[in-house]
Amino acid sequence: MNSPGPLSKKMFAAANLVTPGGVNSPVRAFKNVDGEPFFVRRAKGSRVEDIDGKTYIDYIGSWGPNILGHAPAVIINTLHEVAKDGISFGIPNLFEVKMAQKIVEWVPSVEKVRMCNSGTEATMSAIRLARGFTGRDKLIKFDGCYHGHSDSLLVAAGSGALTQGNPDSAGVPKAFAEKTIVLPYNDPAALEAAFAAVGDEIAAIIVESYPANAGLVFPKPGYLELLRSITKKHGALLIFDEVMTGFRLGKAGVQGLENLTPDLSCFGKVIGGGLPVGAFGGRADVMDFLAPNGPVYQAGTLSGNPLAMAAGLAQLGELEKRGFERLDQLGAHFEAGLRKLLDEKGVPHRFNRVGSMFCLFFTDREIVNVKDVMQQDLELFRKFFWGCLDKGIYIAPSPYETGFISLAHTEPDLDDTLSVFEEVLRKI
Ligand code: HOZ
């Protein structure tokens, strides 16, 4: 069993006595790489330090939120200032309005938005709203797409569910799962067949705008447009899950890059500045179906709390200062170096990147959907992961996760990472 350091090992044993699997989210447990996790002591900029005193260049960034890097001064200072006037009220506050205005300003498809506390809450609420609005129950999702862990969506899921080899969770009532139609991603014929069969029963399609929980997979040309046109034709809603891509790939996320207008969108991660957050929004006529205006109930004690809102606004403010351009520049630098290295080494691979999100697959198979992702050389990935961790590079402990570059990463960080990749691949 691989393990990073003696203090982490001891802490993991202690954690296992009081927490299932020793972790508060399965993907953290390092099961897919046959090992145990390190425990973090502190983090700053592009680096995290574990309790054994070892430092790593981090490509997880708290699974996406830390787009400015760890503990940026602008967010720490904002939190200090805002907390002085209260931490949470359960009463409307100014920051939640400012955040809603910012989202509406940046994302053209969003006319109204409701804040919540996680991406899971956002997607769960969006599908309830879609069902309430359309008066239909059935939902289409795609194999390997992960939309958090609510009952209707934990079917053929990606991320931790895939990592544990358990894409269909126990405990999800059969009656719920039956309402979720799972289709292969990037397969227009399967989509058309589903709509031909039960089109008038489908409330919505929910899709990760760029699937990023089973590696990083891109839509074939025209596929997202087909999702848009087929939902419109059959009176169903199109829900873009932009929890990972939103406010990371530009002001309007993938829908901005692809020039598409979903009916509803789900957000999280970056808009909380590292604090728990989620949001869903879209067409005003649909959003007004929510209580207190409409019949679909959704609520939250801490929703729109001033700390998460202010931290998110501070983060968006930094991104607005040419942050997205810089992230793309860093991503392109990394991609160029990595492609050169892998070609020179003759390692069969595919590499997908958009802006500051990336995924390396150890396969030469074209990556169309999760089936292709699962065909990669998993043993090679494990060896690569531990080789990198040993040399101070932390990539996700699973071949099904996307890597993130932050504004705190520098070209020398990326070059050092590539040197480690070279050394590790040479020794494997
Ligand atoms: N969406 C994140 C990973 N793909 C969630 C992290 C987690 O499950 O802990």
Image: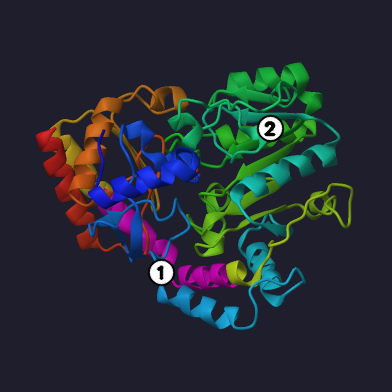
- In the figure, is residue 185 to the left or right of 49? right
Q: Amino acid at mark 1?
A: Ala
Res 69 → quadrant: bottom left
Overall secondary structure of the magenta stretch?
helix
Give left or right: position of 298 versus 390. Answer: right
Across and down, in percent, residue 127 comes to 72, 40
Q: Badge 1 is on which residue?
A: 71
On screen, residue 351 versus residue 204, left or right, reads left
* Residue at left offset 19%, top offset 30%: 347
Q: Considering the numbered disc 2 on the image, is that residue within a helix, a strand or a loop?
A: helix
Residue 399 vertical placement versus 423 (above, below): above
Q: Residue at x 80, y 55 (%)?
A: 284
Quarter of the picture holding the C terminus: top left
Amino acid type at circle 2 is Ser
Residue 14 horizontal side relative to residue 213, left or right:
left
Q: Is residue 212 visible?
A: no
